[in-house]
Image (tube, rainbow, N blue to C red):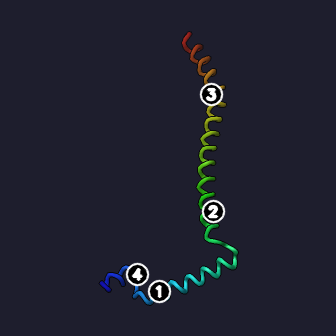
Amino acid sequence: MSDQVNRFLGDSPGRTLVKLIIVSLIVGFVMKFFGWRPMDFLYGFRRFVLDLWHSGFAALGEFGDYLMLGATIVIPLFIILRLFNHSR
């Protein structure tokens, strides 16, 4: 059982606990220094997903705009060229 725990943690439980405490202190110091809060990361991730969602649909809307603009020129020209080629 102890070997499985050591394998899961990557080291003995005591050493793993000490490593986690040291890393937590360093990360906490850096976060405090820059004024970051844990919720800032969650809100930032949420904002990133929403911006990606909205800009993705905006890109699709622009694609539709470009399609309609091009079609106003291409479709009539296609019909005119087909009519002239049909008479030959």
For label 4, the SS is helix
- Which residue lies at the image location 60% right of the left edge and 58% below the top edge? 46
Quarter-of-image position of residue 34: bottom right
State the mark number for residue 17. 1
Q: Any mark on residue 68, and which? A: none
Q: Which residue is mark 2?
A: 44
Q: Are marks 1 and 3 in contact (CB under 8 Å)?
A: no
Circle 3 packing at 10 Å, graded few (<14), some (14-19), many (20+), is: few
Query: Are the residues at dot 2 and dot 4 in contact (C-beta closer than 8 Å)?
Result: no
**What is the CA distance from the residue labelled 1 to the residue labelled 2?**
30 Å
* Amino acid residing under circle 4: Leu
Residue 32 or 58: which is nearer the viewer? 32
Q: Residue at x 50, y 86 (%)?
A: 19
Q: Alpha-carbon neighbours of circle 1 within 10 Å: few (<14), some, or many (≥20)?
A: few
Label 1 SS: helix
> Does 5 sit left or right of 65 as displayed?
left
Q: Residue at x 64, y 82 (%)?
A: 29
Residue 9 - label: 4
Tell me the amino acid under the disc marked 3. Ala
